[in-house]
Image (cartoon, rainbow, N blue to C red):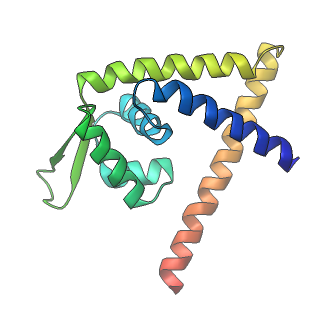
């Protein structure tokens, strides 16, 4: 089973790198842009938590996106140490491109699958994602407690 998952992930990463690279984007950039498009202005910490990434990866990504004019960061009125992040108009336009790329990838992946099979796959993948996310955050809490 693992070999199939590895092959899928490798081909997916290459496809996304190629297609997103055409617009100067990286895969992690697309994750952040899509999250901000879906949820609106957010704290940098919330991006870390929602995407299950480390703080430094998110900070580097946001710096790159800000330099490209796709996001803007501002200091929160509530807490001077807190950074709020939002998409710019250019970021929203990039999101539309990203969504098209992901839709094309889905069409490649789902060739020959019925609507029911697609829905089942999405449901299983959502449950798996919830499980691994819970595991990841409980592991980090354990490390902080027993660190």
In the image: residue 144, left or right of residue 69? right
Q: Residue at x 53, y 24 (%)?
A: 19
120 w.r.t. 60: above or below: above
Q: Residue furthest bottom?
A: 146
In the image: residue 63, left or right of residue 137? left
Residue 55, how many percent across, how many down? 39, 60
Residue 95, by quadrant, is top left
Q: Residue at x 62, y 37 (%)?
A: 13
In the image: residue 109, left or right of residue 35? right
Residue 40, how many percent across, how many down? 32, 33
Q: Residue at x 59, y 62 (%)?
A: 136
64 w.r.t. 105: above or below: below
Residue 79, by quadrant, is bottom left
In the image: residue 114, left or right of residue 33? right
Residue 115, how many percent across, how many down? 77, 14
Residue 58, how many percent across, how many down? 38, 52
Q: Residue at x 21, y 57 (%)?
A: 82
């Amino acid at each position: 089973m693992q070999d199939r998952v590895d092959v899928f992930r490798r081909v997916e990463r290459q496809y996304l790198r190629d297609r997103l690279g055409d617009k100067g984007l990286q895969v992690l950039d697309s994750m952040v842009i899509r999250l901000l498009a879906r949820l609106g202005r957010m704290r940098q910490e919330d991006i870390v938590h929602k995407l299950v990434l480390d703080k430094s990866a998110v900070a580097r990504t946001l710096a790159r996106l800000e330099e490209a004019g796709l996001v803007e960061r501002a200091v929160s009125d509530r807490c001077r140490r807190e950074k709020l992040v939002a998409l710019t108009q250019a970021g929203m336009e990039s999101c539309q491109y990203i969504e098209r790329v992901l839709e094309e990838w889905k069409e490649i992946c789902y060739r020959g699958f019925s609507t029911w099979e697609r829905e089942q796959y999405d449901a299983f993948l959502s449950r798996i994602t919830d499980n691994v996310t819970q595991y990841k955050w409980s592991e980090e809490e354990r490390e902080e407690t027993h660190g």
